[in-house]
Amino acid sequence: MINRRISAIILSGGKATRMDGEKPFRKVNNNYLIENVADVLFNMDIPFIVVFKYLCNNTNGINNTIKCDIDNQIHIFKKYNQTITFDILNNKGPLIGILSGMNLVGRGWVLTLPCDTPLISENSIKNIINKIPLAESNNCNCIIPKHENGYIEPLFSIYHKSTIKILEQIIRSSSGDKHPAIRQYIQKLNPLFVPVDEIDETHKSFVNVNTHNDLNKLKKEK
């Protein structure tokens, strides 16, 4: 079965400044954005880890915003009974989320999913997982959907856990507050690029919610 070959990471960190923060917990029809993604994995019986943004020390005590974050995170833990964790470093972009989750997964192949893709489907996840035998036969250690124009979907992708050492090296070598680009990681791997149409002909699974306008548009469509 496909779910025996893989575990998943839901990337829920980042500042989400265009949405005034807390993107995972924006609501669409009474569901948090993150729940749309988590529900699909849960229904498919794929174990997953949710990586939330860096948990900083607050010397002034817990304010209402942080308390709300914690309450929402507890809700996710109780609903799915899956591991939750946090970015191990602040402001290092999605690569630190992948590393934070990879440190905890126990399976060879790791599916990464952003929390802001609420139209993701079971079928699209099955389609990308079904590419694993092809990747293995070609000695590829990641599977990346690719559009006709060359644009890739590195956050809805599959990486082998053996690549964690490369990921650690990239993050260690990054300087200051600059985040390492995810392309740096992929360039050091042996990727299997898959046309996005082979993952999702509708391309809906790749739709991100980045702004309030995106969110409002989604509410109207659902």
Image (cartoon, rainbow, N blue to C red):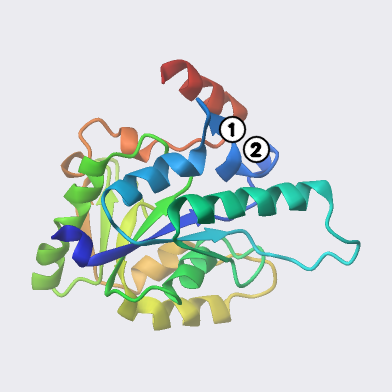
Q: Position of residue 147 (x, y in %)?
A: 27, 43
Image quarter of the C terminus: top left
104 lies above or below 210 = below
Q: Is residue 107 visible?
A: yes
**Residue that mark 1 sits on:** 211
37 lies above or below 190 = above
Q: Picture quarter containing residue 36? A: top left
The three-letter code of the residue at mark 1 reads Thr
Q: Is residue 24 left or right of residue 70?
A: left
**Residue that mark 2 sits on:** 18
**Towards the viewer: 15 or 85:** 85
Q: Picture quarter containing residue 166? A: bottom left
The three-letter code of the residue at mark 2 reads Arg
Residue lying at the far right in this picture: please name it: 60
Q: Earlier in the sequence, mark 2 or mark 1?
A: 2
Indicate the secondary structure of the residue bearing disc 2. helix
Q: Position of residue 184 (x, y in %)?
A: 43, 68
Q: Is residue 152 visible?
A: no
182 lies above or below 126 = below
Residue for point 84% across, 52% down: 63
Check contact, mark 2 vs mark 1: CB within 8 A.
yes
Q: Is residue 107 left or right of residue 2?
A: right
Q: Is residue 24 left or right of residue 206?
A: right
Distance from disc 2 to disc 1, alpha carbons, whole Å, reads 5 Å
